[in-house]
Image: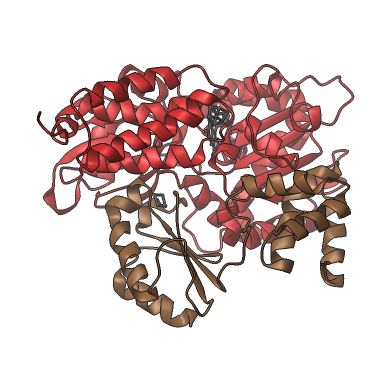
Chain colours: A red, B brown
């Protein structure tokens, strides 16, 4: 399978600039700086690259919303908050391929005419910060960052910003509020960050994986990128796989790759000869697929959507026949209750209520009708909130219950 | 309560990285944690004074983020992930084992002040579950035996 992001990642010393350059690193930047910023942006638009943070929005188009004539600074923020349960792909890029990200950020900043860019990294990833700092310093020393990037009339600084433990700061407006030194409270859109973001200036927030894919696109051209994957989901995507499969870890697959083949061949199938019970394909906030629902499903945005779920972050969680669905759901309900920022009543109250109902079931203290009550709660939470965390909290609850209802019924004492 | 001369220098360096002073608040709170161990009301007031903010503004931000300790914690902070993948991978067993070995419950600190035990949400290490973070370091693919070895080193 062709690889864009992981081609060299497991080679030793890839995190050092010398090795990265021996493997073709910074060629994309050299080429980009021979182009105009507009040409670089057009190339990314034509490549069809879509955001890898969860929402899948076309990257080049997002950049094109940034007004270039406001006289204000433009900011590019790299979202390295990676906290969606099941997701650990950005971590691999940050730890082992920091220069791919840095090169991608420089090219993207050039296209946007941004001169100050932040890497917003989750606080728990503090152990990666020294690696990142070293890579950034190497890029400064090599003249790829600073007042004149590669001797051109383009200045760029990259600053690492260490967060402090709040899932909601991965949501882009929450991230911006947090970077401004406040609580990470998301804001209603519009205004979109492209127009009014960090310090009320035009701002682009992009995921680590999105930015790391940019150098390859510039080196190989937009057309080469559109040849990979499907028409509407071009390129490759990282999936971080956890749960009882033979091979866990981070995989790069061409979009459109069959899900079943991925689980049974690439991941080696289910451990100890057990049976698959379900798979959450795109991080905990997307609906689960039952084992009998994975036939003919492909790993791309469209196919997963027609299967009733989303590609999301690519955090794939496998559950085998031994997993108790109510018990596993409780861990996710606790997660969302803990991470709701509390601004919207339906989300603040609803996430706690769902968690309590599920724990009550596990303790055998529920009554007939409580399962439907729980489903009703999910309806009250959905839609009426500032950000998508609430919908993300509802997705596992509703899909676990609808698809494994008998396991929940079994917990309700008979009258 | 005051930053050391070294921390004061770091504070100045941090400010230079942001076009707006307030944006430097999170890194300055991290500096506060390194200096004072945790963000008390007094520490928040000190930082507020430095940055031209009110004490309640600073404390309100500090309290939003779980990683800023608001009270004294042990010399080492053991944080075990309990979210879905780690749960399937055996987190409950690891948590019980730690409780037994340390003789404390989750949320408590050993009487000698050496270790605080917490459970946390997904740390981005789901493929190497179960896992825990001790101070800044990640420990993955845990077994009761490897946990014992790690505890031995923390003594
Ligand atoms: C609750 C919530 C958490 C999110 N967490 C992350 C995250 O950790 N990392 C990320 O890149 N995007 C996250 N997102 C998506 C961001 O809001 C945003 O869409 C993304 O960073 C844009 O980058 P992209 O277009 O390159 O994907 C989250 C969204 C929501 C609603
Ligand atoms: S939906 Fe939930 S997490 Fe999002 S802003 Fe509202 S309360 Fe906060
Ligand atoms: S579930 Fe524990 S690290 Fe992700």
At horizontal 62% and vertical 32% (from top left) the residue drawn is A172
Q: Residue furthest front?
A: A415
Q: Residue at x 28, y 36 (%)?
A: A279
Q: Nearer the viewer, residue A331 or A57?
A: A331
Give the camera-side residue of A391 and A298: A391
Which of the 4 image quarters holds residue B128?
A: bottom left
Task: Work out whether residue A389 can be spotted.
Answer: no
Residue drawn at the location 25% of the way across and 49% of the way down: A245
Task: Tell which of A205 and B86 is nearer to you.
Answer: B86
Q: Position of residue A14 (x, y in %)?
A: 56, 58
The image quadrant in which ligand 1 is located:
top right
Tell which residue pokes out farthest to the left in this image: A414
Relative vertical location of residue B123 with respect to residue A152 in this rendering, above or below: below
Give the answer, above or below, for where A1 lies relative to A204. below
Above or below for A118 versus A255:
below
Residue A354: x and y, percent?
Answer: 36, 32
The answer, for residue B37, to whether it is visible in the render is yes
Using residue A284 as the reference point, say whether residue A201 is left or right of it. right
Q: Position of residue A51 (x, y in %)?
A: 55, 29
Q: Quadrant of the N terminus of chain B?
A: bottom right
Q: Is residue A141 left or right of residue B79?
A: right
Q: How many marks?
A: 0
């Amino acid at each position: 399978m062709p690889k864009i992001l992981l081609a060299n990642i497991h080679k030793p010393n890839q995190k050092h600039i010398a090795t990265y350059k021996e493997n073709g690193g910074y060629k994309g930047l050299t080429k980009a700086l021979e182009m105009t910023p507009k040409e670089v942006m057009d190339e990314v638009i034509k490549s069809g690259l879509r955001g890898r943070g969860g929402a899948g929005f076309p990257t080049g188009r997002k950049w094109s919303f940034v007004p270039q004539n406001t006289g204000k600074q433009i900011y590019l923020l790299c979202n390295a908050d990676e906290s969606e349960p099941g997701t650990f792909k950005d971590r691999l890029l940050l730890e082992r391929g920091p220069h791919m990200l840095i090169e991608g950020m420089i090219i993207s900043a050039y296209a946007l005419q941004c001169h100050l860019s932040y890497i917003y990294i989750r606080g728990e990833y503090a152990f990666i910060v020294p690696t990142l700092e070293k890579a950034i310093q190497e890029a400064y020393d090599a003249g790829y960052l600073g007042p004149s990037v590669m001797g051109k009339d383009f200045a760029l600084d990259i600053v690492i910003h260490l967060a402090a433990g709040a899932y909601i700061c991965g949501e882009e407006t929450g991230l911006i509020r947090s970077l401004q030194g406040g609580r990470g409270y998301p804001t209603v859109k519009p205004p979109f960050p492209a127009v009014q973001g960090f310090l009320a200036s035009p701002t682009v927030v992009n995921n680590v994986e999105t930015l790391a894919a940019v150098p390859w696109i510039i080196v190989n051209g937009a057309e080469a990128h559109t040849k990979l994957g499907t028409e509407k989901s071009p390129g490759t995507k990282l999936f971080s796989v956890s749960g009882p499969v033979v091979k866990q870890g981070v995989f790069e697959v061409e979009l459109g790759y069959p899900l079943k083949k991925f689980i049974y061949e690439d991941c080696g199938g289910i451990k100890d000869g057990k049976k698959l019970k379900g798979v959450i394909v795109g991080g905990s906030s997307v609906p689960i697929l039952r084992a009998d629902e994975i036939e003919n499903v492909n790993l791309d945005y469209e196919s997963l959507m027609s299967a009733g779920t989303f590609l999301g972050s690519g955090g794939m969680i496998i559950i085998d026949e031994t997993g108790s669905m109510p018990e596993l759901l409780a861990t996710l309900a606790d997660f969302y209750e803990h991470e709701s920022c509390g601004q919207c009543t339906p989300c603040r109250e609803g996430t706690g209520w769902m968690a309590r109902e599920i724990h009550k079931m596990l303790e055998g203290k529920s009554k007939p009708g409580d399962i439907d009550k729980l489903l009703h709660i999910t309806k009250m939470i959905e839609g009426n909130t500032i950000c998508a965390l609430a919908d993300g909290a509802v997705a596992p609850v509703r899909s676990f219950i609808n698809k494994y209802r008998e396991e929940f019924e079994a917990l309700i004492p008979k009258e | 309560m005051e930053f050391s001369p070294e921390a004061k220098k770091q504070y100045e360096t941090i400010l230079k990285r942001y076009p707006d002073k307030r944006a430097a608040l999170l890194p300055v709170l991290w500096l506060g944690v390194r200096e004072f161990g945790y963000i008390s009301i007094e520490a928040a007031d000190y930082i507020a004074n430095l940055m031209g903010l009110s004490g309640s503004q600073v404390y309100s931000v500090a309290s939003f983020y779980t990683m800023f300790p608001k009270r004294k914690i042990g010399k080492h902070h053991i944080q075990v992930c309990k979210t879905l993948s780690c749960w399937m991978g055996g987190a409950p067993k690891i948590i019980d084992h730690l409780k037994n070995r340390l003789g404390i419950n989750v949320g408590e600190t050993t009487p000698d002040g050496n270790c605080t035990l917490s459970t946390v949400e997904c740390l981005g290490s789901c493929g190497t579950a179960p896992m825990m973070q001790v101070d800044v370091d990640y420990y993955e693919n845990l077994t009761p035996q490897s946990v014992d070895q790690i505890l031995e080193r923390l003594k």
